[in-house]
Amino acid sequence: MNPTVLSTKAELRQYLEQSAKRRRLSVVPTMGALHRGHQSLIGAGREHADEVLVTVFVNPTQFGPGEDFDRYPRTWERDLERCEEAGATAVFRPSKHEMYPAGEETRVVVGALGSRLCGASRPGHFTGVLTIVAKLMHLCGPSSFVFGRKDFQQLRVIQRMVADLFLPINIVEHPIVREGDGLALSSRNAYLSAEQRIQALAIPRALALSHRAHAEGRAPEELVSLVRSRLQDARLELDYVEALDAESLQPLSTEEQPKGHVLLAVAAFCGRTRLIDNLVLGVDAAPTVAE
Ligand code: AMP
């Protein structure tokens, strides 16, 4: 069945009023350029509710100056087909003005969870993310929101916001969806040339190696060095490679064994394209990679 397309807050409100009487709702926020990873999130949404609303909005406030807001892939016709294929019941595709009307100025500011990793490399990014996600959560009301672990830090800062602001939202986490050769699916993979696409495989390969090294008992800092050297060998420009506490996203204590899970997170440039990936040690399976 064709998903209902909603363009304004008023249309969304009307849709929610009609569906609220009979159904539970899942929401999958996206920036469009949908791929199999997004479709898998929609599938997870269906498991938690009777209706799945996908939002498609390239959120200007989460892009910094000089980043790719203007050239971010916009593939609306395809997106709608993909939403239908995956079983979404509605798609909310607001304009910029609809989400940020003239005169608006309020922001949801991230705390310490946003201080490292992407928060350090992309100042203001998570404030933009939290602001748009808070707006969407407020518009949708009590529901399940589905987020991918591909954007691990994003997931954590959103979980924190939901707890801190007492939002009536159930967060559903979804594992990373990868291509057959191991590369994590991303809308930004469309920027890669054929040669860069091969070069980018160094990221899942390095994570697979670190998975093995962890199983052999190597310490997190050794895994960081291993991943760094592999990515440098592949001539990727590193943004960060870090092993952090997977809950607090703060550095691991050097004196003792890590208490909780450890997140190994990577961001690297392949040409001008910034790619991110991660592994939670001892929890995630190794990426299956092409040799
Ligand atoms: P985006 O459209 O890139 O902002 O992503 C929208 C949602 O899809 C976010 O919750 C992402 O974490 C999630 N997502 C994007 N790519 C993947 C992937 N390869 N695997 C799992 N989730 C993903």
Image (tube, grey):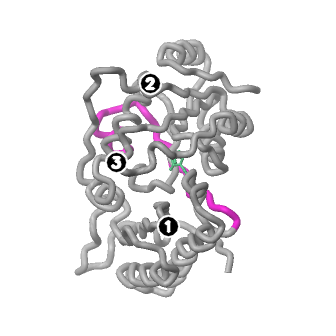
User: Which SS class for mark 3?
Assistant: loop
Horizontal relation, residue 126 to residue 46: left or right: left
| Lower sequence index among marks 3 and 1 | 3
Where the N terminus falls, by quadrant?
top right
The residue carrying mark 1 is 271
The residue carrying mark 2 is 141
Image mark count: 3
User: Which SS class for mark 2?
Assistant: loop
Magenta highlight range: 158-180
Q: Nearer the viewer, mark 1 or mark 2?
A: 1
Q: Nearer the viewer, residue 125 or 54?
A: 125
Q: Nearer the viewer, mark 3 or mark 2?
A: 3
Task: Name the residue: 60% across, 44% down.
Answer: 33
Q: Is residue 165 magenta?
A: yes
User: Which SS class for mark 1?
Assistant: loop
Give the residue type at disc 3.
Answer: Gly
**CB within 8 Å, label 3 to label 2:** no
The residue carrying mark 3 is 64
Q: Nearer the viewer, residue 161 or 154?
A: 154
- Distance (Cα) linking label 3 and label 1: 18 Å
Mark 2 packing: few (<14 Cα in 10 Å), some, or many (20+)? Answer: some
- Distance (Cα) linking label 3 and label 2: 29 Å
